[in-house]
Amino acid sequence: MPDGDGLLQGAQARVVGGAGGLADVTDQGGQEGARRARPGARGADRGVLVITTEAPCEVIDVHHHVAEIEGLVGARNTGTRAADPVDARIAYLDAHGIAGAIISPSSVGVHSTTAPRLNDQAAAYRDLAPDRFLAALGTVDPLDVDAALTEIDRAVTELDVRGFTWHHHFQGTVINDPRMEPLFARLQEHRVPAFVHILAESFLEEPWRLQVLADKFPELDIVALDGFSSGPQAGQMPELARRCPNITFDTGVCISVAHGLDRFIDAVGPERLVFGSDFYSAPRMFALPFPLYELLNLGLDTDTLTKVLGGNIRTLLRLGSYEPAVPADVG
Ligand SMILES: [Zn+2]
């Protein structure tokens, strides 16, 4: 990189943490240094932006689908089509310092006839690396209540799934379809939470629809997925959280501006947010789990990060407390 006065264009960014430790990155954009001279959230020397990439606590990613969604998101196929690449998923976790992931089945193609197989797949995938895939969720078809209730019972007792997930946009009904009510009631009996997508711009998944269900089942833990997926919707999340104390929110599909994660935490506390990146088997939709690095650089204290990045989901899914690996005795 350029060295010495007059050669350095723009500003330097010192990246702290990560596999590479410290790295100097020079902005070659040709803009004046002042454009990047503003200190980062944690503060920095004038002209140097300090980016934190290493969490001070355990990190669990709550939003990992074992599924392909090619064609639905306009992402290009990167060729990872064979069986779900367990090694690639673990490499992704390792690259970003993520200790574990919660495995969800596909959101697409869920019918009463396919749900048992999808749930079997999610549980089998969890068992391929149980030290990294800390739990599996199941799914059921809300359009066939009898089959769904049978499958909820089976998946909890035989597969040890720790919750159930729905993506109504792909399941042909609205979140607050009355047929969801007996399913939520059964989850409440089993004391396992519901993970419900509220992706922005989906008529079927508008956040108020989840509020209707959450009001009817105040004892059921609910995790709202993708709530911060547009600016206007992100702005609604603190109010939804205040209204529904049984809803926790993940960071899947979090937009890069106006997400208001720090405002959300200020409004309702760090117990109501969990980190999720919305990782799919294929195609690859992102290189960096943006919300992880955003959370690490918002200036949040360690107690808050410990809850948001791992502690809250351990409590919700009854995963037990975090026990850091004991360093090897180096004598
Ligand atoms: Zn999802």
Image (spheres, rainbow, N blue to C red):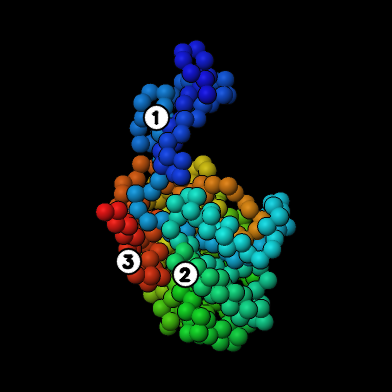
Viewer-nearest residue: 172 or 296:
296
Residue 204 visible in the current orientation: no
* Viewer-side label of 3, 2: 2
Q: Residues within 10 Å of mark 3 (few under 14, many from 20)?
A: few
Q: Is the C-beta separation of discs 1 and 2 under 8 Å?
A: no
Determine the image quadrant of residue 80.
Answer: bottom right
Q: Is residue 88 above or below residue 192?
A: above
Q: Is residue 171 above or below residue 240?
A: below
- SS at mark 2 in the image: loop
Ligand 1 lies under 8 Å from the Cβ of mark 3: no
Instruction: Give how far across and how far down residue 75 sits, in percent.
Output: 69, 51
Amino acid of disc 3: Ser
Ligand 1 lies under 8 Å from the Cβ of mark 2: no
Amino acid of disc 2: Pro
Q: Is the C-beta separation of discs 3 and 2 under 8 Å?
A: no
Which residue does the numbered mark 3 point to in the structure image?
321
Residue 39: image tag = 1
Amino acid of disc 1: Pro
Residue at 29%, 57% (x, y): give it: 329
Specify the quadrant that holds the C terminus.
Answer: bottom left
Residue 130: image tag = 2
Q: Earlier in the sequence, mark 1 or mark 2?
A: 1
* Viewer-side label of 1, 2: 2
- SS at mark 3 in the image: loop
